[in-house]
Amino acid sequence: MNFSLYIAKRYIFSRSKNNAINIITRIASAGIVIGAMSLFVVLSVFSGLKEFSLSFSNNFDPDLKVTALKGKSISISEEQQRKLLKLEGVFAQSKIIEERVLFMFDGKEEVAAIKGVDSIYSKVNDVKKNIFNGLWLKPNTYQVVVGYGISEKLSLGLFDFNNKLEVFVPKPGKGAIENPEEAFNKTSIIPVGIYAISEDLDSKYVFADLGLAQELLEYKPNQVSGIEIKLKPNADEEHIKTALQEIFNNTVIVKNRAQLNDSLYKMLNTENTAVYLIFTLVIILTLFTLAGAIIMMILDKKGNLKTLYNLGTEVKDLRKIFLLQGTLLTVFGGLIGLVLGTIIVLIQQHFQIIMITQTLAYPVVFSIKNVLLVLATIFSLGLIASWIASSRVSKKLLD
């Protein structure tokens, strides 16, 4: 067995005659355990909150979305349509139209986005599962599905034939408007369903048939705002994005789900990074205690070190003793803390002990990435603290 490692293990498991050193060593060890456990639990909680927050937008956002590089719409030729249908790795694709319009019902007004969708849309985004009242719209009809927030603001019910829900869309063109009534394309629509996902999304969209949206916006049959695509499992996303750019001659923008929610992802990642840095600072402060314990151990064992030095042990080997001692304490403490943190996370994940509401458990996610991050943080910081403390061993100290 390596000489320095043997002595380091003896120093870890043997009690010092100085009780103060024993107490400080125990405090440092407990601090490492608690620090590792806390860091892992907090990272798991934020991973759960991130997944929970993204689950709302994931119900609406496709795997890939194709939109125009310039302007509001793209025209799809028959040749481009054939190429789109032949793309490998694509499960389904749906043409959509999005535009901000004005809705009026029983004297009340609300500006929201009308989203024209074709009959394949439900294969790309399973929005039907979020309908809590009514039905999904039928193709080639004037039926619409509204968000819960819009229905509340307009006091809107379903299948209300006494009061009409009207939609107003500004007519395209240039020049001054002489007659305000001729400035809008308008029609009456029939709400047949109400969806509920989140407060933001519930006030954002009114789903309508693609043909109706094209009629209101005076679009051609092959003119749409974009294409939403659902990929097959294990599909090569980058290859498909490149193929889409080739099909449309680089006149479109292709974004994945993360890019569609760029600000949300940045906010969640920033919060996660901030919490990680705060808890890392706490661990650094804890490891100052470890460094102090090692320095006190060096002073306590000064006589033994002199004896070993006089017997021919080099100074670097004596330093290595305390470097290994601190590293071993960090490794054992980090692993114990990680095991305790894993137990806490798995208990919450499976038994849902801590609840936000009566029906919603506090979200946590066990992630190997978080395990590796905690191990890397604890071990690297523990190694640095041990190296700083062990550097106190010098010839001057032993003379």
Image (cartoon, rainbow, N blue to C red):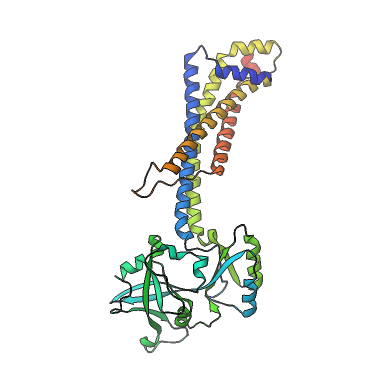
* Residue in the foreground of this view, choosing between 328 and 233: 233
Where does residue 248 sit, x and y in percent of width and height?
Answer: 63, 73
* Residue in the foreground of this view, choosing between 389 and 344: 344
Q: How many marks?
A: 0
Where does residue 191 sit, x and y in percent of width and height?
Answer: 36, 74
Find the residue positioned furthest to the bottom.
178
At x 52%, y 34%, the residue is: 338
* Residue in the foreground of this view, choosing between 13 and 271: 13
167, above or below 30, in the image: below
Residue 282 visible to the viewer: no
Q: Quadrant of the C terminus?
A: top right
264, above or below 73, in the image: above
Where does residue 96 sit, x and y in percent of width and height?
Answer: 51, 73
* Residue in the foreground of this view, choosing between 295 and 270: 270
In the image, is 80 to the left or to the right of 30? right
Where does residue 258 sit, x and y in percent of width and height?
Answer: 54, 58
21, above or below 239, in the image: above
Find the residue positioned furthest to the right.
312
Residue 363 visible to the viewer: yes
In the image, is 146 to the left or to the right of 89? left
Q: Quadrant of residue 159?
A: bottom left
Q: Quadrant of the N terminus?
A: top right
113, above or below 359, in the image: below
Q: Quadrant of residue 101?
A: bottom left
At x 33%, y 69%, the residue is: 151
